[in-house]
Amino acid sequence: MRVSILGAGVAGLCAAHVLAARGMDVVLCDDGRAGASTLAGGMIAPWCEAEVAPQVLERGKTALDWWVARVPGVARRGTLVLATGRDRGELTRFAARTLGHQSVAAGDLEPALADRFDQALFFADEGHLDPVKALAHLRQGLPLAPNPRQGDVIVDCRGIAARDQLPLRAVRGEMLVLHAPDINLSRPIRLLHPRWPLYVVPRGDGIFMLGATMLESDDPGPVTARSVIDLLNAAYALHPAFAEARVLKTGAGLRPAFADNLPRVERWGGVWHLNGLYRHGFLLAPVLAQELADALIGGMAHAD
């Protein structure tokens, strides 16, 4: 079976690898434009994400092993969740809504935070990766085709661009990349706040990715001043040395989401779709790709 996959974001690339491993002849069709996947935090955090979406926990538990087996540089150092003193209730609430954590002193795991935070939640079984590097590695060796309609089967993984076919809505996310060489953090940090929660993901060499806003908006334009201010204020609350950081990059992208914020594999009008990954792209794309492969192989068996 020859399968044409439309889109080379995290959904399309995971689908291509899984289908090829199942023995299918896969070709990738992509226009080369960077999508929302390259702006992601790259956190593989099913236990933390279950706080807002309990359904992702069971489906996302195997994602970290999947990525470790396929791309270099995946870190398995867990996630540290913090709150400032006045927001300590947010930490209590987060603990009550999640599993897989233990209470720790922040400084025991991240000495840079020792004087600013005492209590923290540590999710030891989570990890993170660099999305740009991970996607580039997955793309190596995959055949490309200029004709997006080649193949016995078409799989549409175009994200928000598939709104012409699916009932998707856009959820805008904004991010910053900072160079802060005076700060040493080794794992993703989530700073809880009722209005502007922050995550900080280390990329190495004093570089950190900060994200991410969640705005119900179709605007694909540049990062807004308000979002930059909110992200930087949150980063300063985490560590004052972020005030001296250099801003290396800003970015904004549109996440694809269905009404229930849960992704789907389904067939519409003769085309298979893997879409609606919302804020869980790197966490859920591997298992969605497996579900797609099962559906295609099941369809082949039924046809026989």
Image (spheres, rainbow, N blue to C red):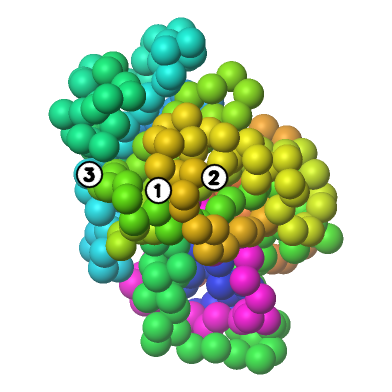
Q: Residue at x 40, y 53 (%)?
A: 180
Identify the amino acid type marked 1. Val
Q: Find disc 3 in the rendering and name its residue.
A: 77
Image point (34%, 56%), residue name: 181
Q: Quadrant of residue 72?
A: bottom left
Q: Relative to residue 202, is residue 106 drawn left or right? A: left
| In this rendering, the label closer to the viewer, 3 or 2 | 2
Q: Quadrant of residue 98?
A: top left
Residue situated in front as seen by the camera: 220 or 167: 220
Q: Position of residue 242 (x, y in %)?
A: 45, 44
Q: Residues within 10 Å of mark 3 (few under 14, many from 20)?
A: some
In the image: residue 73, left or right of residue 180: left
Number of other residues with Cα within 10 Å of mark 2, as a class: few under 14, some 14 to 19, many 20 or more = many
Using the image as rendered, state which of residue 39 and residue 175 is in the foreground. 175
Q: Residue at x 36, y 28 (%)?
A: 81
Give me the C-alpha separation between circle 3 and circle 2: 19 Å
Tell whether label 1 touches label 2 (CB within 8 Å). Answer: yes
Q: Is residue 38 magenta?
A: yes
Q: Residues within 10 Å of mark 1 (few under 14, many from 20)?
A: many
Q: Which residue is mark 2?
A: 211
Q: Secondary structure at mark 1?
A: strand
Query: Which residues make up the magenta segment?
Result: 18-42
* Residue 89 within the magenta-colored segment of the rendering: no
Query: Compared to 174, does 215 lie above or below?
Result: above
Query: Residue under circle 1?
Result: 201
